Image (spheres, rainbow, N blue to C red):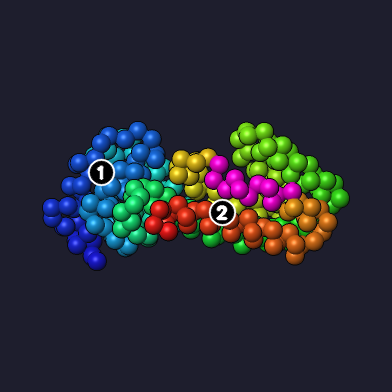
Amino acid sequence: MTDADATSKSPTSSREALDHLEQSGDSRDVLEALSVMIERAKLGVGDRLPPEIEIAKKLNVGRSKVREALIAWQNMGIVTRNKKAGTRLAAEVSANAIHMPLTLKLEAESLLRTHAVRRPLEIEAVRVAAKQMTEQQGLIIIARAAELMAVYEAGEDWRAADHRFHSAIHEASGNPLFEQLIRQIQDGFNAIYEAPFGQPHLGQATIPLHPELARAVAKGDGAAAAKVMERIMDMVEAEVIAILGGPDV
């Protein structure tokens, strides 16, 4: 589809669709509004979105908010951004699943994309950590797992403790790129979706597996640690797919 085709779809062009959206305040609101605009305009992969300044004017928000939202989408693989080519869709934004809202469907698909990239990094990180860690680092990993379980069993928000646990493993690997790349992947999603699907404890069912993971790493058993991490990543992926599939699955 050419640029002309993308901007001449009457009467539901991307520009006209923006006229029907409510004013938005934060980045997530902007993305929700853009999702509706794209669906109404029937834009597909490769089609170009209106310029940032035009989107900002139509939504009555600052251009910085629009840029922040689009950068988040870029990090999540939904759009590509180029000064000459503009902002183009790199993934389908379509409400072809009647049982769930468009924004929820888009959120689930985005999380699956980031999860697919994070998965091999996390598995390799525990494998390397089991081989490279010092005795002191092994003790720290066990302690972080105990802290995580204590917070989890108390019914409190365990996300910070979970982050400290995995950071201890990444540090034990001796390769700072594990932490940097995984953090970059997470930040790209969490910039907008801090609580995926409105569920801040997505992946909670995996927490009881973390002490087993810690013991495998501390014992220097990279193969066992990798298997536990695979199970953890499988469980999170299955949870997201179940949400994406909805009640019909």
Q: Nearer the viewer, residue 155 or 50?
A: 155
Q: Which residues are magenta?
A: 201-211
Q: Could you tell me if residue 172 is visible in this image?
A: no
Residue in view at x 45 percent, y 44 percent: 197
> Could you tell me what secondary structure mostly forms the magenta stretch?
helix
The amino acid pointed to by label 2 is Val
Residue 49, x across and y down, in percent: 29, 53
The amino acid pointed to by label 1 is Glu
Q: Element under label 2? A: helix
Q: Nearer the viewer, residue 31 or 46?
A: 31
Q: Element under label 1? A: helix
Q: Which residue is labeled 1 in the image?
A: 54
Dot in front, 2 or 1: 2
Residue in view at x 65 percent, y 43 percent: 163
Q: Could you tell me if residue 8 is visible in this image?
A: yes
Residue in view at x 75 percent, y 52 percent: 212
Residue in view at x 71 percent, y 41 percent: 149
At label 1, counting other C-alpha atoms closer than 10 Å, the crowd grade (few under 14, some 14-19, many 20 or more) is some
